Image (spheres, helix red, strand yellow):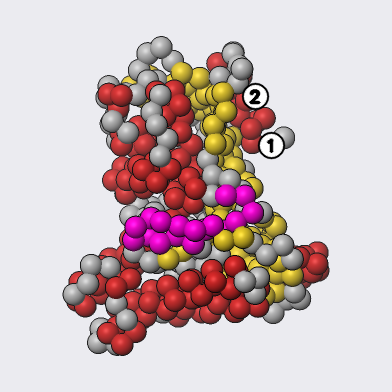
Amino acid sequence: MNAADRAVRRFRAAYEADPALLVRAPGRVNLIGDHTDYNGGFVLPMAIDADLVIAARPRSDRRVQVTSEDQADPVEFSLDAISPGTGWGEYVKGVGAQLAPEALVGWEGAIASDLARGAGLSSSAALELATARVFSECSGLAWDPAAMALVGQRAENEWVGMNSGIMDQLICATGRAGHARLIDCRDLSGVDVSLIPTAAVVVLDTGTRRSLLGSEYNDRRSDCEAAAHSLGVDLLRETTLHDVARLPEPLRARARHVVRENLRTTEAAAALQAGDADTVGRLMTESHSSLRDDFEVSSPALDAMAQIAQRSPGCFGARQTGGGFAGSCVAMIDREATTVFVERVITEYEEQTGSRGTARVVSAADGVEARWET
Ligand code: GLA
């Protein structure tokens, strides 16, 4: 049963009524450009055909109540007194708090999701954007994708305590079927870039998970801010390889990753546009080495998965994707080689690590959408 059907079923079981509204928010995979977003740089993600869905209906009071298929306890709060707590409900509360609660009406909802938490597919951005959309629909707010992406990011930064950049929320809000999006994270502008029909994008989940609050992620972000500060720029986007050489280690290596990754990302977008999968793949593989050696956000499981993928039949290139430390890799492969590629990677990964990974061919999907049931 798909996530939408499961959300409706759960809504009916919880509230003994039909939902009035269905909101779908996609996960994402980033083809290239990691740890560049909070440095004002470039990213090339795509929204994917795996969703989080909220089935909902407005309430006549100012209460919000949400149940989720993978959580025992529902989240419940009043829009008149949103106070911090712990657990998954903080994403819902954080979005409410960022949206000016005085202007909101309450709602009740049920969540179902195909996005495993911690797999590196942005389940939290999907929850933030789906929540923002439910609030907007129920309260009659205008939907501005970039503004709502910023609301989601602020909820995550200020309410949940993870200093993530804007990539995940922005692609969840603006994704377009069949396309990746080259986003300039300094001004949030973007261009859609068609995927190559003969190349498939495969998400390779190592099965490893990172801790929820991502303290190492916040540490890397602080390193980047320290590097920018010592170079006298606002954002590492504005520096060059030549200047970076002046920094002490480990800031030099961190900044070198960011400068090179920005160059790789714009080059990869141009190659994708030109249908040149070989070049996109080469840049993806270089990106993995840089995240491993210079930015140090890889892990033995991610390295094993990326290397196995890189040498498997039909692979143009592969890399870890997202924040790192655990989660998934992404590979671009010759579509005709999909079956043999997947079989080889999963078998070898199990032989090498003793764990079973999973592979999923993904296509690029549209960003968050709402539908009122009539
Ligand atoms: C996480 C963050 C993003 C981005 C990536 C790394 O997914 O949420 O903002 O920084 O890591 O590119």
Q: Give the range drawn in magenta.
A: 176-192
Q: Where is residue 22 in the image (x, y as percent from the top left)?
A: 57, 28
Reply yes or no: does residue 254 show up in magenta: no
Q: Which residue matches tag 1?
A: 2
Q: Would the CB of label 1 be found within 8 Å of ligand 1?
A: no
- Of 231 and 174, nearer the camera is 174
Q: Tell me the residue at 28%/45% (across/down).
A: 158
Q: Tell me the residue at 80%/64% (across/down).
A: 339
User: Taking 267 as reference, is 358 left or right?
Assistant: right
Number of marks drawn: 2
Q: Tell me the residue at 60%/21% (across/down).
A: 373
- Vertical comparison of 104 with 250: above or below: above
Q: Rounded to the nearest whole Å, what is the CA distance between mark 2 and mark 1?
A: 11 Å
- Vertical comparison of 14 with 251: above or below: above
Quadrant of the image containing the N terminus: top right
Quadrant of the image containing the C terminus: top right
Residue type beneath disc 2: Arg
Residue type beneath disc 1: Asn
- Vertical comparison of 69 with 263: above or below: above
User: Taking 328 as reference, is 59 left or right?
Assistant: left
